[in-house]
Amino acid sequence: MSNYHQFLASKAPSAIASGFDPTSLPDHLFDFQQSCVEFAVRQGRTGLYLDTGLGKTRCQLEWLAQCGEQSNGMALLLTPLAVAKQIEREGLSLGYDVRVIRDQSQAKDGINVCNYDRLDKIDPDAFGAVSLDEASIIKNFNGKTSGALCEAFAGHRFRMCATATPAPNDHMELGQQADFLGVMSGNEMLMRWFINDTAEASQKWRLKKHAEQDFWDWMASWARMAQGPEDLGFDGSKYKLPHLNIIKHKTIGSNVKPEDGSLFMGDVSAINMHNIKRQTSDARADVIAEAADNDEPFIAWCDTDYEAASLKARMPYAVEVSGSMTIEKKEENLEAFSLGQARAIITKPSVAGFGLNWQHCHNMGFAGRTFSYEAWYQAVRRTWRFGQTKPVNVHLVVAEGEDQIGRVIDRKSDDHLRMKAAMAIAMQRNAGRSSAKTVKYNPTHSGELPSWL
């Protein structure tokens, strides 16, 4: 039976490694970061899912430096808006040859950092290695754009997807990233391990119970995921986050009216949420402006333009970053807050919720939030991340009926924690097991054509 079990184990899918043995690693990487880089370099095409503040950027820079040198000398790091300058500053401080580029004419040997917005202005074939920073945002691209992204780098030996939040409740996203990396197509991943749950109206894909271990073992063959160093088998005692204070405020005197004319609000849904948000916009802004009325840095998060207008009317000293601004203006205002030139900022999680390090700030407020767990998680984690030295205060304004949003986000948070725990166990279970490497075929049989050909 043991031989039979070994035979079955040998049939389990495992990502094929396309990398190489890494050269010496720099001292600025901690032990668990070095372990991640070593794995990623050997794997070649890999996922790096380290939580906020665990040094994901440093790992990417070292991986790009080594893989770029191993290929044609040019590496590309695609990032969300305004993160590019931040990465450039960090990379230069660590001694990397790194620069921000706006088009292909500015690309050089070394690490080239470019915003996703400018993807059409670069030549993918000019780079030997590519990493997608905050790769979870590719699910927000339309099918044509994400398909073009996969196609543009399909022939690259070195590819990486890096994010702190691979979606636990949207397995299509994991499929997209595996597809981009060339590990497995999203459709094959779904067919192998998932079932379309017709019990739910949404018919979402869910992981088959009997396939869970096999799925996470497959994930561990091409990715590294961690909430802290201990998930990777290292000491995590120094990586303890300060306290997070969620301070809930109820809007008072906002005269919220049910959209259907009934006497009671009940739970808010995605359909009537904007009706409630519009009615309470000024009341929410009053609460946030009062919370920000001090000399400390403050982030005011909003979801709509009318919420932003209400906040700006009460916080004229704050810089604003909105989707309608030019890229240059967005970068200018985000830099102003990042460097402390502006005390407060008004923006949306969809605009500035990914990648930025704002540990200089420990106070924020939400004029409202959506059902998106990722938007909430990423926005809070701009300040509540490893490296933050003060307790983080999050002011959350809630209108009547919005408790349902909190319950949905809490459920998704539990899913996220279960996913990371399952992945940590899989990594420990597969420790020391190397991925299969591509083997060149060396024919030994000399064939002969039949006489009639």
Image (cartoon, rainbow, N blue to C red):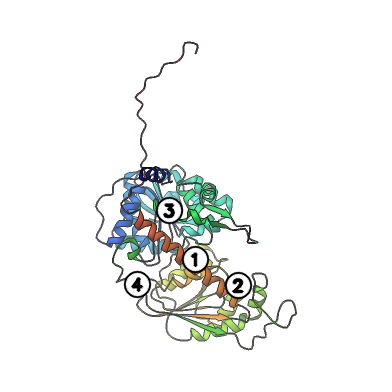
Q: Nearer the viewer, mark 1 or mark 2?
A: 1
Distance (Cα) linking label 4 and label 3: 28 Å
The kind of residue on which mark 3 rests is Met
Q: Is residue 94 left or right of residue 354?
A: left
Q: Position of residue 305 (x, y in %)?
A: 60, 72
Q: Which mark is residue 415?
A: 1
Quarter of the image holding residue 255? bottom right
The kind of residue on which mark 2 rests is Asp
Residue 60 seen: no
| Residue located at (66% from left, 78% from top) | 266
Q: Are marks 1 and 2 in contact (CB under 8 Å)?
A: no
Q: Nearer the viewer, mark 4 or mark 3?
A: 3
Disc 2 marks which residue?
305
Q: Secondary structure at mark 1?
A: helix
- Crowding at mark 4 (Cα within 10 Å: few <14, some 14-19, many 20+): some
- Crowding at mark 2 (Cα within 10 Å: few <14, some 14-19, many 20+): some
Q: Position of residue 275 (x, y in %)?
A: 67, 75
Which comes sooner in the sequence, label 4 or label 1?
4
**Position of 342 relative to 433 (above/below):** below
Distance (Cα) linking label 4 and label 1: 25 Å
Which comes sooner in the sequence, label 1 or label 2?
2
Which comes sooner in the sequence, label 3 or label 2?
3
| Residue located at (53% from left, 70% from top) | 411
- Crowding at mark 1 (Cα within 10 Å: few <14, some 14-19, many 20+): some
Distance (Cα) linking label 1 and label 3: 17 Å
The kind of residue on which mark 4 rests is Gly
| Residue located at (38% from left, 75% from top) | 360
Disc 4 marks which residue?
387
Which comes sooner in the sequence, label 1 or label 3?
3
Name the one closer to the observer, 362 or 209: 209
